[in-house]
Image: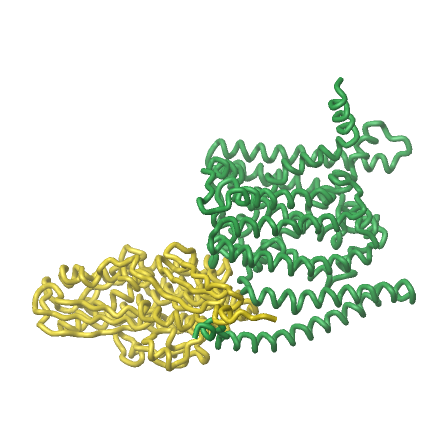
Amino acid sequence: MHENPAQKTDTLLGADELVINMGPQHPSTHGVLRVKLKLDGERVIGSECVIGYLHRGVEKIAENRSYQQFAPYVDRMDYVAAVSNGLGYCEAVEKLLMVEAPPRARVIRTILTELQRIASHLLWLGTHALDIGALTPLFYCMREREEVLKIFEKYCGARLTTHAFRIGGLQYEAYETLEKDVERFCSSFEARIQEYSDLLTGNSIWLGRTRNVGLLNAADCIALGASGPVLRASGVQWDLRKAMPYAAYDQYKFEIPVGVNGDTYDRYMVRIEEMRQSRLICLQAIENIPAGPIMARVGKVLKPPPGEVYHAVEGPKGILGYYIVSDGGTQPYRVRIRPPSFINLQSLDKMIRGHLVTDVVAIIGTLDIVLGEVDR
Amino acid sequence: MSPTLHAVLAFVQTWWVELLCALLTVLVVPLIAGYIVLVERKVMADMQARLGPMRVGPHGLLQPIADAVKLLLKEDLIPDNADQFIFWFAPVLSMTAALTSMGAVAFGPWFQVARDINIGLLFVIGISALGPFGIVLGGWASNNHYSIIGAIRSTAQLISYETTAGFALVSGFLFAGTLNVRAIVEHQRADHVWYLFLAPVGFFTYVIASIAETNRAPFDLPEAESELVAGYMTEYSGFRWSLYFLAEYANMIVVAAVGTTLFLGGWMRPFPNVQWLGWLDAFPVLLLGATGVYCVVRAGKQPAYVQAMFMWTVALACFVIALVFGLVELGHIVALRSAQPAHLFQVLDSIHPGLYGAFWFLLKVGAYIYLFMWLRFTLPRFRFDQLMRLGWHILIPLALVNVMDVGIALVLQLELGWNRWWAMALTTLFTLVVAALLLRWNDRHAATASSSLLAPPSPLEDANA
């Protein structure tokens, strides 16, 4: 048989690769992420993320706002975990001012932040399951998340972009039934988590879709700067709540769940277990909320001394860091934010290569990105 | 009278029943499909702790009408780069295939378009196999990457699972010894058993294959919303989209009807031969009556006067239909008891099999479709390679072994005089052992397959290097 030598150097079967655009308008890129995929059949052989569709210039805005004025803006980065964002920012500025929030404020901050972690993970679980085709868990997750949002609403009047904390402590005293509400939520929540596990954990389709999908080993995680559940699922026990305690975390006992393989299933299990641990932290914290003031003595106009500070907290999605430079004025000279979603997203290409298109949505889901935070 | 008109009249006179049935099918199936969608949304809402459609009419009862009107009024959009003719033709083909295959399905002993054709279910399988052409042509004509991926997936999936469904049906045909729909049902009555119990593995494989064949979750990869936007339907909108949609739901009805006919005793009441269970005939009346009473109770709680009126209307309709069922049943009983019943009772009695047959048939089809919905809202979606592996490595071998085993069971029973249940139990046990082995082998195979997924064989990169 005659073989054409020119064809041998051509692609397999003479077929071209297919380049498809996933997003920015796509049901499961969690907002406005755009991924260019190069496909061989349905297998991904390359990818490129295009981001910036939700860029609002948050860091630049900070340079034209006073320290207090900028606080509500950070709520709008990771808008499903506004409380955690606010905690990081307030503590960073407090560090810059060299003041410390009073113990009562720190405990209430811890409770609300852990509830926010649960809410954020619930939203992740629902949408991740939806991406993989399980329609129902989303609504169960939303039902529980609603409970958390109601607590926020009772506390500060807002549900999503809460602006719950102030620099130096809290603006609002805890409402009367806060402990009772949190306890009621926590007591029913354990059974709810079991409900999700019944639907998903042992399901063989779920296992088939998540096991060995989107593998990322510990060395790669560290090299890519991944943090949060993505890092811990790969077996690295690194959680700022334990490693560099802030708020009131040093007072409570909790475990840091870690995975073994670093696949989508491990990340799922890590987040499920984190919700359990957050519940335990909340239960411990409401046992004993210290009495006392909720606000440290900070002036009406904040004028931190010239200098710079970096403060990071463990957000639901990973390490959320604030680097603030002060020139001694009322406005920050520069604010740089280390967004966990943006940095975790960098590992997407490494994870999806060799997988099928179907797995791409599962892997985008497992990274738990929020585009508001990626683009800022 | 012109000869043409004469011929037409003669034709109508000969075939008026069939023509009427066909017309009813074409007219009513879209409506039924719309209401299946409503039921599906309500079932989904029930499983997901919410209410579902509540705005259009009480409890959203008019939602399908509103949806249909909206779809008809939408702009008819054909993308510039699409192949205009095929784009137009593909949904029509899908819809035609779905409706035509319904022609051989018997909804009760009376309602069947193609009466008593001896190839019966083979006709249904054959025609519904044309459906994928509509999908693949539509996906190709759209000139869209998502569409073409959806269309290719769909073709592969439908071809694979139609094989399974075919083999699963063969296990039922072997018991019936015929393909004629009517004869199959009569055979089940004569055998005193639904074929579900004689060929459980066959029924099981048929259920799975039928879900895959109708592109329903967890096998809804061709239109996997979270990956492919809407699969082959991505570029379709308005009326054309609704044709695809109708075809999908019509296909659901067809596969459910085939399964019901072959495995669930068709239009026969459960236990048709057991005299003391005759009270089951009162079931339709009770069901409709209860629905009517429920509507009456709810009518008082409606927020608006219009809604209360609507509820009353629904209740009235339920009571009227219940009354019809009751009268027909009465006629049936009187005709059975007395030697010379009045003419009215004779007429009522003659309606009895058609009416009650249709009721039981639709009830069974409804239960089958409910199973579809239940699975859809419970399970995550398969990945394409997993779907194909399930089809070719497990279901097709299983269905093949099952056909062989049913054959063996029949030989044991007919030639060697075994008890039917012993023969069935023995062969089913053997099939289950095969199934277990297949699953185990597949698990091991899947493990190696997914690990090879991690180190992608990249012929393209090698070739380009």
The quarter in which the N terminus of chain B is drawn is top right
Where's residue B245, x and y in %?
56, 46
Image quadrant assignment for residue B386: bottom right
Left or right for B6, reference A30? right
Where's residue B322, x and y in %?
69, 36
Instruction: Give the colour in which the image draws chain B.
Output: green
Left or right for B43, reference A263? right
In the image, residue B225 above or below residue B344:
below
In the image, residue A255 above or below residue B228:
below
In the image, residue B222 above or below residue A355:
above
Instruction: Give the colour in which the image draws chain A.
Output: yellow
Where's residue A117, x and y in %?
35, 67
Q: Is residue A154 visible?
A: no
- Identify which residue is drawn at 67% across, 35% down: B24
Q: By what rule are the colours in the image chosen?
A: by chain
The quarter in which the C terminus of chain B is drawn is bottom left
Image quadrant assignment for residue A86: bottom left
Q: Nearer the viewer, residue A350 or B84?
A: B84
- Identify which residue is drawn at 39% across, 69% down: A348
Q: Is residue B64 visible?
A: yes
Where's residue A164, x and y in %?
25, 61
Left or right for A223, reference B208? left
Image quadrant assignment for residue B113: top right
